[in-house]
Image (cartoon, grey):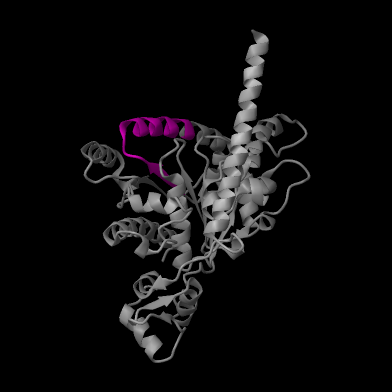
Amino acid sequence: MTMTSLDSVSSFADIILDQGDEISSKLDLLRIERFPPNAQKTLRQFSLAEVADFIGVSQSYLKKLHLSGKGVEPSVTSTGRRFYTASQMDDLRALLDRVPHRRDGEKLQVIAVVNFKGGSGKTTTSAHLAQYLALRGFRTLAVDLDPQASLTALYGIQPELDNKPSFYEAIRYDGERRPVSEVIQPTNFPNLDIVPANLELQEYEYETPLAMQRRDSNEGKLFYTRIGASLAEVEDRYDVVVIDCPPQLGYLTLTALTAATSVLITVHPQMLDIMSMSQFLLMLGGILKSVEGAGVNVSLDWFRYLITRYEPMDIPQQQMVGFMQSMFARQMMKNPMVKSTAVSDAGLTKQTLYEVDRAQFTPSTYDRAREAMDAVNAEVVDLILQAWGR
């Protein structure tokens, strides 16, 4: 009986290892097919309307600039439509003196996106927010702290094949620790870098309690300072950091929260998700009280609840949103992240709404999704600017 049990466990392990390898190799083939010739993601051009919106000027003003020979030379179609690269958008922003980089005395903004229930739209929120900030001209660092590496995959990186280091290298407890500057990778977006994730991040969850027990070292007892200290090494390079936290309340999430200047809690407006969130808040509050008791002041410029995957015509969801607003209206984002097939369809090709071409979708579907996504992200930008006192 024991042999049969052991054999079945061994067989199951072999099967899932083989299937994991098979999925990985097939995904790599799709990546090569999707992004030839070097399997690296590129970035589409942006329409005149998009560029005007991202920079904050009128379309007619940009047209006049082009016609007068000033600024950059866009691609012009046979019908007269103008398209710009993201780099050209940056050049225009510099020409018009609209670069939004933080000024002297304005601290690095570190936004932790959290929820310990999977499926809350946390990674989708993180990815689109980081890209939007970059397109608005903010020097942005995306940090993937989830060992499952979903955010990393969106940027065309396969951790098990590409052998990219993760944030673990900058927060580990042994002599192999490296500066975070050595693990940062560029992305296909100007102004946007990423610290990828991989399964090694899970080691931090195991090693931290062991380090806390060692009498000869304070490193474990001060685990919650490690991400903040690492980011301090590169803070002169960035305006905003967006951290996609793992869907669990472990040491990685706690370390991110103590480094954060603001927190975005994603919430799917259904009863089970609201119940789960209440448990998350109670656990988080208790643990943060303990951290504060150790002398660390968790001070945030702001925190907000963001309704995600919202279906406006769904009556129970409307009731859940009303339930939340009745309790803490001041902490609710004014704009919800609306559920859209455009977001999920873009995700099939490891892309976001800012990467896909509108022509690939039903225009009204794409436009509704972009309008909702832009409204959420613009609200975050307003919160960042308020934190800077602008």
Note whether residue 280 is visible.
yes
Location of residue 270 (image quadrant): top left
Relative height, residue 361 to residue 289 (above, below): below
Give the number of marks: 0
Relative height, residue 1 to residue 171 (above, below): above
Q: Nearer the viewer, residue 199 or 285?
A: 199
> Residue at horizontal 47%, vertical 82%?
95
159 to the left or right of 128: right
Q: Where is residue 311 in the image (x, y as percent from the top left)?
A: 27, 45
Q: Position of residue 320 (x, y in %)?
A: 27, 37
Which quadrant: the C terminus? bottom left
161 to the left or right of 120: right
Which quadrant: the N terminus? top right
> Residue at horizontal 72%, vertical 51%?
178
Q: Does the magenta stretch include residue 282?
A: yes
Relative height, residue 92 to residue 310 (above, below): below
Q: Where is residue 150 in the image (x, y as percent from the top left)?
A: 52, 46
Q: Is residue 93 magenta?
A: no
Q: Position of residue 197 (x, y in %)?
A: 60, 47
- Range of residues picked out in magenta: 263-284
Q: Name the residue at the top extreme.
A: 1
Q: Which of 311 and 10 is in front in this view?
A: 10
